[in-house]
Amino acid sequence: MTEDARFEDAGDRPLRLKALDAEDLTVIAALVQDAVLVASDMVWQPGKRRFAVLLNRFRWEDAERASRRGGGWERVRSVLAVEDVTAVRSTGVPRGDADTVLSVLSIGFAPGEDGQGTLTLALAGDGEVAMDVEALEVVLRDVTRPYRAPSGRAPSHDDA
C-alpha cells in the first residue's frame, strides 16, 4: 500500500511532531497558525538552550470534519519547544502582562551558516519573537484533550 497519510488516519490522538529542517517546519507552522497565548506562557531557559510556549492551538487537522458536521470547532493546549536556542529577542510583546492575548500568524526560519539561523514567531499586531538557533529543532506536542473552541467559530482570514 503506497497511499499518503491523511489527517483522518490520526483520529483524536494528540500530535507530537518534530521539525529538523525548513520543510518540516512548514507543517508545524500550518498547525500553529491562529494559536492564541499570553506572554507569560512563553519561557526561555538559557541553561537548557530551550524556548517554549504553551499555546491554545486551533485543531486545523480536524477543521474539515468539524465543518461537515456543522461546527464543533476545537482547540487543544500544545507546547511548542525550540531547542539549541542561543539568544531570544522580541518586539511588540508585552512583558509581565498575563491578560494580553497574543495570536500566532506564522513561524519562519532564516538559515545562516553551518545549520545556524533565526527562527521567528510572528504575532498579530506586529509582535515578533526571534530566536537564534545553533540548529533547527522544533517540537510541537499536544498536552491536553481537545476542547470546544470558546468562540464557537473557526479562525477566518477574510479581511486579510
Image (tube, helix red, strand yellow):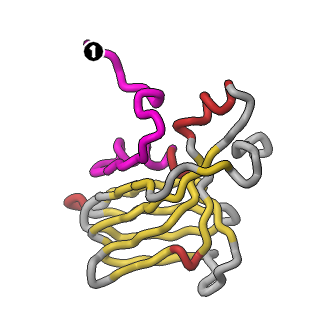
Is residue 78 found inside the magenta-colored segment of the image? no
Left or right relative to 80: residue 71: right
Residue 6 is situated, as x and y percent measured from the top left of the image, at: 43, 26
Q: In the orientation shown, which residue stands out farthest toward the left?
A: 114
- The single residue placed furthest to the right in the displayed view is 159
Question: Residue 129 versus residue 16: which sits nearer the camera?
Answer: 16
Image point (27%, 78%), residue name: 48
Residue type marked 1:
Thr
Q: Which residues are magenta?
A: 1-30
Residue 15 versus residue 50 in the image, above or below: above
Q: Secondary structure at mark 1?
A: loop
The N terminus sits in image quarter:
top left
Measured as percent of width and height from the top left, residue 4 is found at: 35, 21
Q: Position of residue 53 (x, y in %)?
A: 47, 68
Q: Residue at x 70, y 78 (%)?
A: 99
Q: Is residue 46 left or right of 94 when viewed as pictured?
A: left
Q: Quadrant of the C terminus?
A: top right
For disc 1, the marked residue is: 2
Q: Is residue 157 above or below residue 7?
A: below
Q: Residue at x 59, y 56 (%)?
A: 35
